[in-house]
Amino acid sequence: MATKRIGFVDYRLDNYHAEVYLKAIRGPLAARGYEVVGATAIEGEVSRAWAEERGLPYFADVSSLAPHVDCFVILAPANPELHLEMCEAVFPFGKLTFVDKTFAPDEPTARGIFALADAHRAQIQTTSALRTTAVQAFVRELPSPVQSLLLFSSGTTFAEYGIHPIELAVSCLGHEAERVMRLGPAAHPQWLLQFSGNRTALIDFNPEAEIPFSAIVSTQQGCERIEVDGGTLFLDAAASILDFFDAGRPLIDRRESLMVRRILDVAMSDEACNAFVDLQSSGGQHAVPAPHFAVSAAVREDHHAVQPAGR
């Protein structure tokens, strides 16, 4: 079996996701037949040093990396505001591309990225690492639909880490989310999501303490508490990326990816504070995060690393 070649595209390669995905593909997943053969990044100096320390060829830009790879992984997990720029560089090559969380800084940009992929006939997929956990595995085997989810999660900011419990909720309950409301104090907020069929998800997000991801799943048969295994979380996430590459097509419904982003937008808006916002209304489709939820844009001076051929 011929080895399939992966290229990393990043803002700065010295981040946790680049590290764990490289180790997973080189280590426990090596038998899958994939190899990370090169990388490029916007912040070139620190990224080149990172790559050299790990014996990974570093390329000056996407154009020079592209001939050597069969598929791309766009990282920059803390910088969704850069993903469109990176996708503009990568998609013209028409190769399978995984885009790391958070897919885009807002829903309009997310839709723009999907439209760009379609224009270049590039097959793409995006998920949080919380897409492939014991929670989803449990839900798939249930004899009846989930009625409600209670999700416990944490992270330094909801803007960066809120995607994880929302990905969990949407992956278990589907893209037909109808309303969302934010409750509780800013230091420890909760979000109530209502889905079609009167199904619900309550997200408890703690930015002040490290709380293991877990879920209480309720069905007609009763309730079950499931804790996410943090030790295998990114190994399972890396395996799911390779599943996508093996299939040659996205395995995640695009409607779910877009709903995750819409929920994030509305969840961080002032309108959702102690009041339901209809996710299907014009207000829900055009909500913007309140200023205190905003993520500072990365300061970047060097753009050449992500330029496609001829640009």
Image: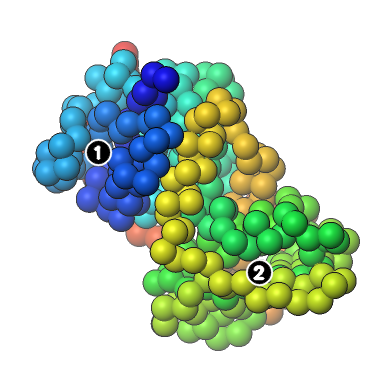
Rendering quarter of residue 306:
top left
Up the image or down, 7 lies above or below 79; here it is above
Look at the image and tell me in which quarter the C terminus lies.
top left
Look at the image and tell me in which quarter the N terminus lies.
top left
| Residue occupying the point 65% across, 57% down | 136
Report how far apart the C-alphas of labels 2 and 1 lie in the structure. Answer: 36 Å
Count neighbours of disc 2 (C-alpha within 10 A) and say few if under 14, some if 14 to 19, many if 20 or more. many
- Foreground label between 2 and 1: 1
Question: Left of 81 or right of it: where is 276?
Answer: right
Residue 47 in the image: x percent, y percent? 18, 42
Rendering quarter of residue 249:
top right
Residue 203 in the image: x percent, y percent? 62, 73
Residue 170 in the image: x percent, y percent? 67, 56
Per the image, the residue denoted by label 1 is 42
Per the image, the residue denoted by label 2 is 271
Name which residue type carries label 1: Ile
Name which residue type carries label 2: Glu
